[in-house]
Amino acid sequence: MTDEEPAAPILVALVDDNRISRDEHARLLNAQPGVTVVSAEATLSVTMLTEEQPDVVLVEAGDTEVLSLRAAVTTRRVLPEADVVITDVLPDNEDIADFVKAGVSGFVLKEATSDDLVDTVKTVAGGAHVLPDELTSPLFVQIAAEGIVLPDDADGPKVAARVALTLTLREQEVVALIGEGLGNKAIAARLCITTSTVKTHVRSAMDKTGLHTRVLLAVSAAPPRDK
């Protein structure tokens, strides 16, 4: 009778701009048997993904979903075998469908317990998806079941060229500011135009590019750069 080899640990990377919650999650997960936190940073690094090869990447939702969705898309492109979990999600989050389309494997609600977080990490690492009951809706279930992902040319040179050729200079400015995480009011103040005008530019940009949510428009037209 031979001894069985111990199972490889689940390698976890944390992406959270709140240092307190990031450190708490790192301590919690490192205390779990079979779980090792290989990175805990405020922003996602492509270098980290390629060097550390995490099994699960936890991305904090933040005040705006643009940056967290961008991190999810980047993770799936750079490390397709990794699972992405979005944390601190609000039950009424309107961009959940975009996360599912980007290939996110699980969600942890803002009011979730420590056990919920640990269970979600282990569940997605085991190949399953985690969808809290509060986020369940007919539309969401349909999207999740279809397994829709972003198209191969949803970012990079193809979309950049399409944006440059089809959008007006003002529309390009609005898209760039959405990519920075700004809301309509902040964009209006930055460009000295009305909020209604901003909304008009956003709708026009979506129609011209075929990217039908503001989050996907921002993520696709302005992919992150590694430091």
Image (tube, rainbow, N blue to C red):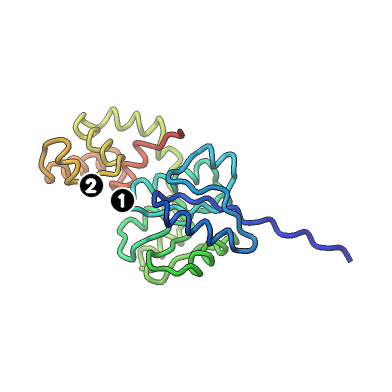
Name the residue rendered at 57%, 63% in the picture.
122
In the picture, the quarter occupied by the N terminus is bottom right
**How far apart, in angstroms, are the residues tagged by discs 1 and 2?**
8 Å
The furthest residue to the bottom: 133
Residue 112 position within the rendered picture, expressed as x and y whole percent measured from the top left:
42, 68
Q: Circle 2 — which element? A: loop
Q: For the point 41% across and 33% down, which residue is it?
A: 156
Residue 72 pos. (x, y %): 44, 48
Residue at image point 74% right, 60% down:
6
Q: Is residue 186 left or right of residue 116?
A: left
Q: Where is residue 208 in the image (x, y as percent from the top left)?
A: 26, 38
Q: Which mark is residue 64?
A: 1
Instruction: Residue 226: give x, y in percent of width and height.
Output: 46, 34
Task: Give the amino acid type for the residue marked by disc 2 in the picture.
Answer: Gly
Determine the residue located farthest toward the right in the rendered image: 1
Residue 216, placed above or below residue 133: above
Q: Is 75 in front, or is 103?
A: 75
In the figure, is residue 83 to the left or right of 5? left
Would you call the spot at circle 1 few (<14 residues within 10 Å), some (14-19), or many (20 or more)?
A: some
**Residue 6: which numbered mark, if any?**
none
Q: Which of 139 and 41 is in front in this view?
A: 41
What is the crowding at mark 2: few (fewer than 14 residues within 10 Å), some, or many (at least 20)? some
- Residue matched to label 2: 183
Q: What element carries label 1?
A: loop
Which residue is pictured at 50% across the width and 49% down the height?
40
Judged left or right of residue 147, residue 94 is: left
Q: Are marks 1 and 2 in contact (CB under 8 Å)?
A: yes
